[in-house]
Amino acid sequence: MTRPLSVAVAGLGTVGAGVLRLLRDNADVVTARAGRPIAVTAVSARDRTRDRGVELAGLRWYDDPVALAADPAVDVVVELIGGSEGPGRALVQAALAAGKPVVTANKALLAVHGAELAAAAERAGVPLAFEAAVAGGIPVIKALREGLSGNRISRVAGILNGTCNYILTVMRERGREFADVLAEAQKLGYAEADPAFDIDGIDAAHKLAILAALAFGRPVAFGAVHVEGIRRISALDIAFAGELGYRIKLLGIARCTEAGIEARVHPCMVPQAAPIARVDGVFNAVVAEGDFIGRVMLEGRGAGAGPTASAVAADLIDIARGRSTPVWGAASGALSDAPSVPIEAHVGAYYLRLMVVDRPGVIADVTAVLRDQGISLESMLQRGRSPGEAVPVVLVTHETGEAAMRAALARIGALDAVLEDPAVIRIEPA
Amino acid sequence: MTRPLSVAVAGLGTVGAGVLRLLRDNADVVTARAGRPIAVTAVSARDRTRDRGVELAGLRWYDDPVALAADPAVDVVVELIGGSEGPGRALVQAALAAGKPVVTANKALLAVHGAELAAAAERAGVPLAFEAAVAGGIPVIKALREGLSGNRISRVAGILNGTCNYILTVMRERGREFADVLAEAQKLGYAEADPAFDIDGIDAAHKLAILAALAFGRPVAFGAVHVEGIRRISALDIAFAGELGYRIKLLGIARCTEAGIEARVHPCMVPQAAPIARVDGVFNAVVAEGDFIGRVMLEGRGAGAGPTASAVAADLIDIARGRSTPVWGAASGALSDAPSVPIEAHVGAYYLRLMVVDRPGVIADVTAVLRDQGISLESMLQRGRSPGEAVPVVLVTHETGEAAMRAALARIGALDAVLEDPAVIRIEPA
């Protein structure tokens, strides 16, 4: 038996404690699969006194996480601090500079500084592994970077944020409004006290930026991801979606088109029969489409101590076995330089829901605006009749350009008879 | 740039031609991800003259596939001949003995001779890769062997044969009988002229044996897999399944229990709401359950030239990058010696459909037999009334042992009023 792989863990929140627990409880399995024991020997966290439910006696404790990189008895550094800046970033930089492999769950760091870190890992000739950064324990990084590596990937799409998917699922199942379900999710621990990061789509955008870089073999480009969250989704639109044969999901979607790479996170209407439409609650799912493999979907728990620890352990076992892959799937010199395409160039079908005064001529005004922008309608839905009162009108368009749609929306929103900002949701094919 | 990886391909059917096409069409992507070009330099197939739609000029041609192993200019051998015996097996043995890495799509070979081949690969210190052997391009081997490697896996289950899933899907959607749909599937090329291998569950059993070995880290044990096919599934039972909230799928299921490893392939009733119940047509899916990750599902195309070539290419890229994993996930000395559990020890719920003469007392006789065997009923369904004629009666049991069920079936089948062999389908939880 080779000597144990000596691991330092920075950050002992639920995920860090989960990693320690996995390596202890499953030591036999891990040792067999890694070909040698994997032992945590050093840790760093803010509070030495907190009970984390795992034994820390005998481990070297560092108050400064960056100091872990300099410990000569540490083979691999696991960074679970999080955040694109600050000590997490400093630790990863220091560990790579010291020639030590790094395992991290830090999606923000990879999305924002991934190019620089990939260069550092390449210079040092050590792996920078991050299976835990996207979709929890579901091995999507490995699937894209290794499992589908023979394919030209044309599209990758996913439910990447469990909090949003949980909220949308409960809104649909119980016909409740966003604010109400969010408050409940916060009580249940499914949403953070400050939920903006999740519900405004930032977390999903970090993950999508990572998936897009891997799928298309290009440098990560978080700044080019178009991001919209789920705050404006209403119970009414979810009900209409159901009537039209759709479900509303917050998706991250990246496509490789002739013009370049399109990457966007926003609420979508997806056909009810699409496999991804059935992924409910806190579950995540990622769909990839390749020229030889066709469509593949992976689905499972996207967060939590157990799944995230599972992903960290898989990365550690890879390192123990000497398996490694360039950060973005290819050496930095071999990455594609395909440009990013802005959301304004997006072409697709749109769902539009207006609240209008129920009086003659309103629909004619609205449809005239759409006609003037060259937008054709697939269907229209009007519920109820209350002359002189506000009623919802739903319009579904054929394929149209985002720019034309935005111009039309500005004019429609300015019509007297239109009482609120139109609700607009892009329709995504299965 | 390192020198190209030189590959020999044995077997130029649709999959072999697909591998050549992938390596040619996606050479840029493959080279970037492999860190070096991957070039097919030698081939072997039966017919030199057949047009396979791919350029073979300039390749060294061998009539005897085993000779590929001895070609000093070949770095890796790809075996696409198939079959657990014969030239495919001889080639893999010869290549490993010559110290050459092997990539194969041959599930029968791995299932039947996997232990011996793993030992040969271990002795030679070279990889034996077989992503293409299970579920086509879906990276399930990689997911189990590497992606979930930190977990104690308790259960792996899957739709592993596209032909069976296609037939069952069409039977359900159109209310048609097995023989009829099989004949059509043969015409469409979804089923072989001799369909036994698929519809009798052998192909799925080969794949399940492989998955079970990987999931539980034990030597492959094809002989211990209990196998039943789909010939006896009727349109009537599919209709009753729908009424009861189930779908009928041919599943391969392996479980790690206190008594040992249970592995079985048979038609199952699965709850309609289970993700695997929704996987229709020629698609495959594999569900794995681990102690840290929870439940993960992978779904995609399980066969065909494109998906299989995708899996072979992924294995070749792993080899080009120097990534390897022991055949069964751990060195042979570190594998588990958990015993196999026979199907007679199975415990679960059962669906029973009898054709009985519609007359007083029949149900009392049947339920008395069940009571005598200690089998309790969850529900009973009787459709239509035709005194003196044959009518179907459906019984769903609570959890019961296979042995008790078999004893009850023997006695029920012998009752005068029971007109055919009872239809029995095991119910599998989601």
Image (cartoon, coloured by chain):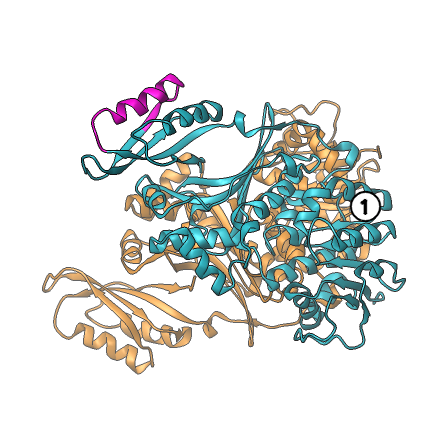
Chain colours: A orange, B cyan
Indicate whether A269 appears above or below A9.
Answer: below
Report the quarter where the C terminus of chain B lies.
Answer: top left
Side of A179 where A208 appears, left or right = right
Side of B29 where A270 appears, left or right = left
Q: Which residue is mark 1?
A: B121
Report the quarter where the N terminus of chain B lies.
Answer: bottom right
**Chain part drawn in magenta:** B358-378
Q: Label 1 marks which chain's residue?
A: B
Task: Determine the image quadrant of residue A50.
Answer: top right
User: Which residue lies most toward the front here?
Assistant: B416
Task: Determine the image quadrant of residue B121.
Answer: top right
User: What residue appears at the point 74 percent right and 34 percent down from the top-left corner?
Assistant: A32
The amino acid at mark 1 is Ala
Total numbered labels placed on residues in the image: 1
Q: Nearer the viewer, residue B198 or A38?
A: B198
Query: Looking at the picture, how far across and down is residue A22, in whole percent?
Result: 64, 32
Residue A229 visible in the snapshot = no
User: Which residue lies most toward the left here?
Assistant: A387
Query: Looking at the picture, how far across and down is residue A296, in whole percent?
Result: 54, 56
Query: Looking at the picture, how far across and down is residue A302, in whole percent?
Result: 52, 44
User: What residue appears at the point 48 percent right and 49 percent down from the top-left corner?
Assistant: A161
- The verdict on residue A306 being magenta is no
Residue B17 visible in the snapshot = yes
